[in-house]
Image (cartoon, grey):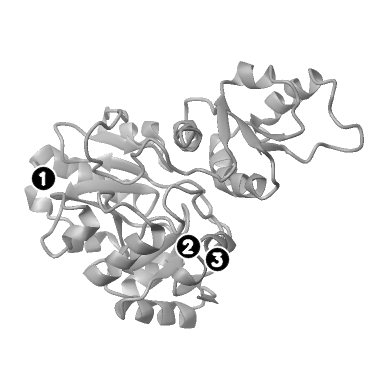
Amino acid sequence: MRILTVSDFDIALAAEALRSGRLVAFPTETVYGLGADGFNPAALARVFEVKNRPRFDPLIIHIARVEGLELAADLELLEGEARRKTDLLCEKLWPGPLTLILPKRREIPELATAGLATVAVRLPDHPAAQKLIALSTGAVAAPSANPFGRLSPTRAEHVRDQLGDRVDLILDGGRTRVGVESTVLDMTGPSPRILRPGGVPQERIEALIGPVAPPQETEGPVNAPGQLKSHYAPRTPLTLYEKDAMIALDFDPRGACLFFDGASRDRWLQGQRDLPGSGPFPGIRVLSEEGNTTEAAANLFDTLHELDRLGFSRIRAEEAPPSGLGPAINDRLCKAAARE
């Protein structure tokens, strides 16, 4: 495993590695992806092997420009209204943290789509990612660069610590900006449906194309990443609480506390009598002092990685409000808590 910068020279080296069938972890605006040539079945198989990812869980194909969508998706199979809405979403929300489920082209290997007739595609809003994809084959399959079911990586060192020499190259672009994975929107049904909340709020999508159906429990095979009940989990067991229940918790020296905002932390602290007296307790973290869901989402995985290293027996986390990126935060926390 070799760590490179995001200089033009190193990106060109990484693109050559992708074209030769190797795996490259690279930054996007959401999290770090584990990239493989989207047209190379052997490289795609290595992604599943390295992550220990089940073959029924499809991958997202990343493209470098809107025109590259037709490398992966057969837009002629979309009905008129769905095509109009897809074009509008691509125009207004790409590049960005939005993945679209669309009819697939035959050139995309079955392994990338878990044998489905649809493909997940997105255009990341990160210059290094766009350069890397453009210099390779124009279509890079890239799930998050972590062992399947574990915390997503928002820094190159998270990739190094979790995957080590199982990945060939890592492009280090620093900490990611959005911090949670993309919103996944299915455009192939009777009406658009969110399959995974993520970096684009539902309100922003609906402002462009009208009402969309919310996520629902998946009973059968998944048709997009991030739909399994248990996912995104730290090694430390995590329990999720509503705001008032979190504030009512007693201090536990073995348990870390992850508050959504500073107001919740302060109310909790006011009710505690058994906190250590010598300085602040090291297990208290806040996602956003001012209660901003965008800031909280950007801090979520980074903070969970930090708490996971501190050796607590449990992480007690507060729910985010149900607006903005709150649903994306709560989706990750619910799935982390479901590991138990």
Quick one: SS at disc 1? loop
Q: Determine contact: label 1, label 3, CB under 8 Å.
A: no
Q: Which residue is mark 1?
A: 78
| Residue at the farthest right position | 278
**Residue 325 at x, y = what percent?**
48, 35
Of 4 and 135, nearer the camera is 4
Task: Give the image quarter of residue 130.
Answer: bottom left
The crowding category of the residue bearing disc 2, from other C-alpha atoms within 10 Å (few below 14, some 14 to 19, many at least 20), is: many
The crowding category of the residue bearing disc 1, from other C-alpha atoms within 10 Å (few below 14, some 14 to 19, many at least 20), is: some
Total residue callouts: 3
Q: CA distance from mark 3 to mark 2?
A: 13 Å
**Residue 92 at x, y = what percent?**
32, 47
Q: Which residue is mark 2?
A: 27
Q: Amino acid at mark 2?
A: Pro
Residue 218: which disc? Answer: none
> Of the residues under marks 1 and 3, which one precedes in the sequence?
1
**Residue 121 at x, y = what percent?**
27, 54
Of 338 and 145, nearer the camera is 338
